[in-house]
Amino acid sequence: MSETLYPYIVFLPAKRKQKVLRAIFGSKVPIDILKFSIDQGISEKIYQKNLIESLSYSNKTVISHLKTMTDLGILKENMEKIESDSRIVWMKYYVLSDLGKWFALLLAKENALSRDEKAEIVRSVFRSYVKWVKELSEKLHVNKEILRDIFLKEMK
């Protein structure tokens, strides 16, 4: 059976690594939240109301997991004014952080992502990886010119 395999690098905050992994993989709820975000569009707003209506968990359970995922930097929380039935209503919504997008990507089927979403993820992962290599190379006193030469050679 020949299946395409993709290497995934997930950058985790060193001090919170176990908490983040437990928050995502310790329950089915966060995975369903991430799958919902993939279905919405990985960069789109995730309205709390729509999420609660779509998932088969209690409001309290969903809100608890949203709070945990926000506290750990997987989601970013926002509010938005919306006019509904000629009155103004505040709607809470979430967007995936870069870390959240990487976790969602682990769950996504490649054909579920648009070309633009894939390109955005590649840029984001590349930028984060370059920052990480830069910081590590400074700690290890690796000559940046050597890394630059490697990069230029590989990009030809």
Image: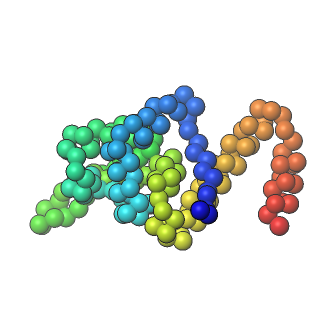
> How many numbered discs?
0
Residue drawn at the location 88% of the way across and 48% of the way down: 146
Give how far across and how far down residue 26 sits, in percent: 39, 36
Give how far across and how far down residue 60 sits, in percent: 21, 40
Residue drawn at the location 46% of the way across and 36% of the way down: 20
State the residue in front, 70 or 22: 22
Vertical position of residue 30 compared to residue 22: above or below: below
Q: Residue furthest top?
A: 15
Give how far across and how far down residue 114 sits, in percent: 49, 70
In terms of image quadrants, where is residue 23? top left
Vertical position of residue 111 compared to residue 149: above or below: below
Here the colouring is rainbow
Residue 91 in view: no
Give how far across and how far down residue 57 sits, in percent: 22, 46
State the residue in front, 62 or 46: 62
Vertical position of residue 90 compared to residue 111: above or below: above
Q: Is residue 54 left or right of residue 2?
A: left
Residue 77 in view: yes
Residue drawn at the location 49% of the way across and 31% of the way down: 18
Quadrant assignment for the N terminus: bottom right
State the residue in front, 145 or 150: 150
In terms of image quadrants, where is residue 4? bottom right
Quadrant assignment for the C terminus: bottom right
Q: Is residue 91 left or right of residue 37?
A: left
Q: Residue furthest bottom?
A: 115
Residue drawn at the location 31% of the way across and 53% of the way down: 93
